[in-house]
Image: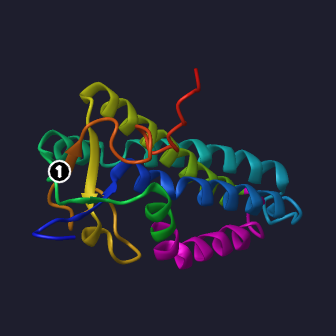
Amino acid sequence: MTRGGQGLARVAVVVRAGAAPLWWLGVLAAGIGLLAPGLTGRRIGVLAGAALFVLATAAVAYSRRRRYAALAASASRAGKHDVLQDRAVTVRNWRRGHRWWLLIAFLAALGSAFAAPAAGGMLLAGCGAGLWLKSAWLGRREQADEALLWVRVDWLRGGAAHPAGKRVKAYRSTGIAAGDAAPGGARRKSPALV
């Protein structure tokens, strides 16, 4: 980076980075949790887990939407010296920074199976599903505004860093074709050969 340029990461990619690990760790914990009879029994555990899945999905998907919207509305244009971080680098950095939180959450979901089988795993999977829904919402907003949203990388340092957290003061924006991720943070599909 030169002359005041910033390292920028896609907001939707940061949000989406936790979706797959939470989903798959939750599915794994729920599957293993079904092996233990638990204090409540499997039927009650699965019913409680289903309720927790729905609640977690809704809570994660709708949390901080006003903050995201306010930051998006006041986004300034990225400068020519700003460096756009690749999708793979953003995902890898997020997962490295949160690996201990993910491990603790997985172990807690496994441990909860002794009380309510599968419930903790389904809660974890619901958090992952909520992040996918939130990244999809961000993608629709980016499509409508025809602008991708970016956040400074230095504001995301640390395991608990969040793209709409207190450390984040503003977003930057670029055209819809910038970077290697599609709106919503998914991998950009390569153009079809004609």
Question: Left or right: 91 with respect to 174?
Answer: right
Residue plotted at (51% across, 67% down): 92
Front-most of 137 and 123? 137
Magenta segment, prevailing SS (helix, strand or loop): helix
Q: Quadrant of the C terminus?
A: top right
Q: Residue at x 33, y 43 (%)?
A: 178
Q: Is residue 92 magenta?
A: no
Compared to residue 100, the image places residue 58 above or below, namely above
Q: Where does the N terminus fall, quadrant-wise?
A: bottom left
| Count of numbered badges drawn on the protein | 1
- Magenta region: which residues? 94-118
Q: Position of residue 59 (x, y in %)?
A: 44, 46
Mark 1 nearby-residue class (10 Å; few <14, some 14–19, many ≥20): many
Residue occupying the point 16% across, 65% down: 5
Going 59% across and 49% down the picture, which residue do you hit?
126
- Name the residue nearer the viewer: 189 or 35: 189
**Left or right: 129 as drawn, with respect to 143:** right
Residue at the extreme front? 194
Tell me: 122 left or right of 133.
Answer: right
- Residue farthest top in this picture: 194
Image coordinates of residue 60 in percent, x first then y, are 45, 49
Q: Position of residue 118 (x, y in %)?
A: 75, 57
Q: Secondary structure at mark 1?
A: loop
Would residue 144 appear left or right of 13 to someone viewing this image? Answer: left
Q: Amino acid at mark 1?
A: Ala
Residue linked to disc 1? 78
Location of residue 182 in the rendering, given as x and y in whole percent from the top left corner: 44, 39
Q: Quadrant of residue 103?
A: bottom right
Give the camera-side residue of 4 and 66: 4
